[in-house]
């Protein structure tokens, strides 16, 4: 029998804040439940059948009392609700300067792709003290990326991108797991989040560096799958130009407006007829059975990289 | 009170003025003596006999589901996989969940004690549709046979939640058969719910107004509403899984153009209210037990009765709290989180009102009442940790960990099973006409309380430490707490088997039970133990509210 842990490690300021919230709620729980435990035992002793006690009572309801023990705990809870909701909203609002990492989940492994093209499986290296944003896709069933030391998890759902951001500020290796039951080897699906100091991280990037960045890999796919035939500037086919597209609002055929985020670009590659850009004929074929989620992630990285290149276009 | 004319020797069924209807004197004997053949049981339409059919079958499934849990706890003694393979463990927890939820917890109190007591408590001869009642048992058994077949044929590996697209496109087990079992048993739930609703509306005896209904009847009524309204949604969701798995109809799998979260919405739209199907009957039982324990009216009858309906209503609006990390909008999550705090208010009212009921009571510590106090303590802990889970930022951390496992076991096993045993010990003399050993009953209640806490309390800590659910290979740091939990589960297993022994013993050796062994109010205690086939010699007339123990003004009682 090897060990006994009683409190999980904290890898970020956010984790410490969640712990404070939990301790606060725990105190409230004790305050709300202790009277019940104590009074049940006390009454059972004092008013035990056959024991002499003053049992005279008249009323069997007092609305004021009942309303107060319904309302007061509820009001106390609302305070914690607001605290918890604010933390939750923070955890859903990544800062703009976050390092982007692509995550692909499949039965039963995690694949990570860094912007510089570095790839790793079941291990994720990140720098301490810098926000990191994960864009996550699943190739098969629902998985859930869970790092207990960050107090964070997010389901990874096939057919859509989900995101998770964090700012781990304490270097070390922390468990990284799949929290959503995903089939036979679910228990074994996991690895480590390795938080490195910025200098160590730079060295790691250097050591694991590959020739091509993720965007460059995407550019190669862009050409080899014939995307450039229609979307390049010189193309004769009337297709939307992709330079400067990312992050902009796109008017659609049906009059609505969407923001060209990762999800929109992914859907436009795999389900091109679903959200047609206004003014373009529906001629794009689907790449659903042609490209893997892995390749789509790289194409998305490429199209994102075009955002910076292009000058502001008149619309 | 009106008195029916004396029964003629030869009954005349055409005489509608004869309130005794077609009873012969022989039928005034106990319902247990009304025929000893297998046929007299399997073709009975007597609600009391159907209740016993259910009692036997849910008990059987309880021990089958419990055996799966025992396997899991045994495997979890060490951090390595040494007893079961990954596949084997997945099948064990899936069957444990499916059997316990649909074949034990949901039918447990409604179909045994609800069936037995509802007509007795409201002064009726039987449920509104006695044949439908028997049919519901056969449908339940048909679903049960499917489940047992799945068990024998090799199991199913999706978790009881059948999440898509794992269940529809990836799992290798007998998903269709298991879904069929749950689909079929759903009809049994609907039939029972419908029967109870009509019975409460139409068959209350003279004077039994809504304001005089025992609180158990109120909670059965609220439960029945959920059964009828929510179960069809589950049936639809399971049918859609079958359509996708069998015919490749793209509904939930994105590879076929479906949406996996649609399934989660449908599933939890049923399954969250289903939690209240499991716990509302228990709340009703405990209200009866607390009043009888204290020999006092329940404090704030209207609030306690109304809170059952409030739980049933608000319970339909909180399903999204199972999906905070599933990818739903954060604003939707904030709303579901808030509503989840709202649904705790009526539960809180019940607990505080029970405590107030005990104040200045004449408190008995006989086994049923120990079980009731055991229920209150465990339900409070389960309910309050539910509030912890409703807090958004905390749920992100503990979702899908042992914290959730501990929380819902406190509600369903600590709560509902304790109430089930409480009901069993309270109404056993009425059901079989014999007393059991009170001393052994007290031992059983204390053992269950102790074993339960040792099993499940460490799991709260494990969950906060980050131990995921549905795994049998875990970090070595978690071992001590897991060993504690497994040790507790062996005590719990013994504690669950113990009542089987002394209750069976009482069948032969127990002293004959008087009509009202606990000195409680309620129409079921006015008839002999066990009750005659048609419940009441003469249709009762109610003139007072439930729990009319009279108020005491003296110092001693």
Image (spheres, coloured by chain):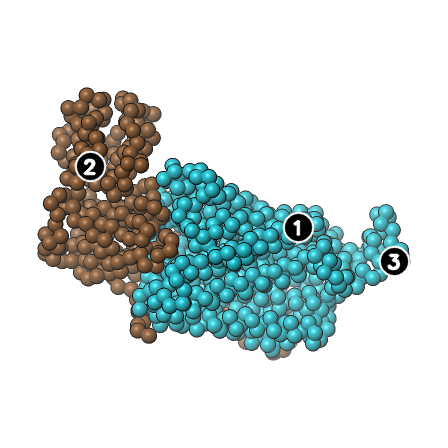
For residue B31, what is the image quadrant? bottom right
Give me the disc on residue B6: 3
- Residue in the picture at 35% in, 48% down: A142
Lower position in the chain sequence, tag 3 or tag 1 = 3
Report if the CB atoms under discs 2 and 3 are less than 8 Å apart. Answer: no
User: Could you say which is closer to the camera, residue A303 or residue B284?
Assistant: A303
Residue B64 coordinates in the image, percent (x, y): 53, 63
Report if the CB atoms under discs 3 and 1 are less than 8 Å apart. Answer: no
Q: Chain of mark 1?
A: B
Chain cyan in the figure, letter = B
Give me the disc on residue B135: 1
Q: What separation in Å lies between label 2 and label 1 (alpha carbons)?
A: 62 Å
Q: Secondary structure at mark 1?
A: helix
Vertical comparison of A244 with B222: above or below: above
Vertical comparison of A68 with B245: above or below: below
Q: Secondary structure at mark 2?
A: helix
Q: What separation in Å lies between label 3 and label 1 (alpha carbons)?
A: 34 Å
Give me the disc on residue B524: none
Please name which of the two marks, 2 or 1, marks the residue nearer to the observer.
2
- Residue in the picture at 50% in, 56% down: B153
Instruction: Residue under label 2, please give it.
Output: A221
């Amino acid at each position: 029998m090897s060990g006994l842990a009683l409190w999980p490690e904290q890898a970020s300021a956010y984790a410490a804040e969640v712990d404070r919230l939990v301790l606060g709620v725990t105190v409230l729980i004790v305050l709300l439940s202790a009277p019940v435990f104590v009074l049940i035992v006390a009454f059972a002793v004092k008013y035990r059948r056959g024991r002499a006690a003053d049992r005279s009572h008249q009323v069997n309801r007092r609305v004021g009392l009942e309303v107060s023990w319904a309302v007061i705990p509820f009001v106390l809870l609302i305070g914690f609700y607001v605290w918890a909701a604010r933390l939750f909203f923070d955890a859903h609002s990544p800062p703009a300067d976050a390092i982007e990492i692509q995550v692909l989940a499949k039965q039963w492994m995690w694949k990570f792709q860094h912007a510089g093209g570095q790839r790793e499986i079941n291990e994720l290296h990140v720098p301490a003290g810098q926000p990191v944003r994960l864009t996550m896709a699943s190739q098969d069933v629902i998985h859930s990326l869970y790092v207990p030391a960050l107090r964070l998890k997010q389901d990874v759902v096939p057919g859509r991108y989900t995101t998770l951001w964090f700012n781990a500020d304490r270097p070390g290796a922390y468990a990284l797991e799949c929290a959503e039951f995903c089939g036979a080897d679910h228990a074994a699906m996991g690895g480590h989040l390795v938080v490195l100091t910025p200098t160590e991280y730079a060295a790691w990037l250097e050591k694991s560096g590959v020739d091509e960045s993720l965007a460059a890999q995407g550019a190669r796919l862009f050409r080899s799958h014939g995307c450039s035939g229609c979307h390049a500037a010189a193309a004769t086919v009337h297709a939307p130009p992709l330079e400067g597209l990312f992050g902009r609002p796109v008017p659609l055929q049906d009059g609505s407006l969407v923001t060209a985020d990762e999800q929109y670009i992914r859907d436009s590659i795999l389900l091109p007829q679903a959200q047609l850009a206004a003014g373009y004929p529906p001629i794009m074929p689907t790449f659903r059975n042609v490209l893997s989620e892995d390749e789509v992630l790289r194409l998305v990285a490429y199209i994102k990289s075009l955002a910076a290149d292009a000058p502001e276009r008149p619309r | 009170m009106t008195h029916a004319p004396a029964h003629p020797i030869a009954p005349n069924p055409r005489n509608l003025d004869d309130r005794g209807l077609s009873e012969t004197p022989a039928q005034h004997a106990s319902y247990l003596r009304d025929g000893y053949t297998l046929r007299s049981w399997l073709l009975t339409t007597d609600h009391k006999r159907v209740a016993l059919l259910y009692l036997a079958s849910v008990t059987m499934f309880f021990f089958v589901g419990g055996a799966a849990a025992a396997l899991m706890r045994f495997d979890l003694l060490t951090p390595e996989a040494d007893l079961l393979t990954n596949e084997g463990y997945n099948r064990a927890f899936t069957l444990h969940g499916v059997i316990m939820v649909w074949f034990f917890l949901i039918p447990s109190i409604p179909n045994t004690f609800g069936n037995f007591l509802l007509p007795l408590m409201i002064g009726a001869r039987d449920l509104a549709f006695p044949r439908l009642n028997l049919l519901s048992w056969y449908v339940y058994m048909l679903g049960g046979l499917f489940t047992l077949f799945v068990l024998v044929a090799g199991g199913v590996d999706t978790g009881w939640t059948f999440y898509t697209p794992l269940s529809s496109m990836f799992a290798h087990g007998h998903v269709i058969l298991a879904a069929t079992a749950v689909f079929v048993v759903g009809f049994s739930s609907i039939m029972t719910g419908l029967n109870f609703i009509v019975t409460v509306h139409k068959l209350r005896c003279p004077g039994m107004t809504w304001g005089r209904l025992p609180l158990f009847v109120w909670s059965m009524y609220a439960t029945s509403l959920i059964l009828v309204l929510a179960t069809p949604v589950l049936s639809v969701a399971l049918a859609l899984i079958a359509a996708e798995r069998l015919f490749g109809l793209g509904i939930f799998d994105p590879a076929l153009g479906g949406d996996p979260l649609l399934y989660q919405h449908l599933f939890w739209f049923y399954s969250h209210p289903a939690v209240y199907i499991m716990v509302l009957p228990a709340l009703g039982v405990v209200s009866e037990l607390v009043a009888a324990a204290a020999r006092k009216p329940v404090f704030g009858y209207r609030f306690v009765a109304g809170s059952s309906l409030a739980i049933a209503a608000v319970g339909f609006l909180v399903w999204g709290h199972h999906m905070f990390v599933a990818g739903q909008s954060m604003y939707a999550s904030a709303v579901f989180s808030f509503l989840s705090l709202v649904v705790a208010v009526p539960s809180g009212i019940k607990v505080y009102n029970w405590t107030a009921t005990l104040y200045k009571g004449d408190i008995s510590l006989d086994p049923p009442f120990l079980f009731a106090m055991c229920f209150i303590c465990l339900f409070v802990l389960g309910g309050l940790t539910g509030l912890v889970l409703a807090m958004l930022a905390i749920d992100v951390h503990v979702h899908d960990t042992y914290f959730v496992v501990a929380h819902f076991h406190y509600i369903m096993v600590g709560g509902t099973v304790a109430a089930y045993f409480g009901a069993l010990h309270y109404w056993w003399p009425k059901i079989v006409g014999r007393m059991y050993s009170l001393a052994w009953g007290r031992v059983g209640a204390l053992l269950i309380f102790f074993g339960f806490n040792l099993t499940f309390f460490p799991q709260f800590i494990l969950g906060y430490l980050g131990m995921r659910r549905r795994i049998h290979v875990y970090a070595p740091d978690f071992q001590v707490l897991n060993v504690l939990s497994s040790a507790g589960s062996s005590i719990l297993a013994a504690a669950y088997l113990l009542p089987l022994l002394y209750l069976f013993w009482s069948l032969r050796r127990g002293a004959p039970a008087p009509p009202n062994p606990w000195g409680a109010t309620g129409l079921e205690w006015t008839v002999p133990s066990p009750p005659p086939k048609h419940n009441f010699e003469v249709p009762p007339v109610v003139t007072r509210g439930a729990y009319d123990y009279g108020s005491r003004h003296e110092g001693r009682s």
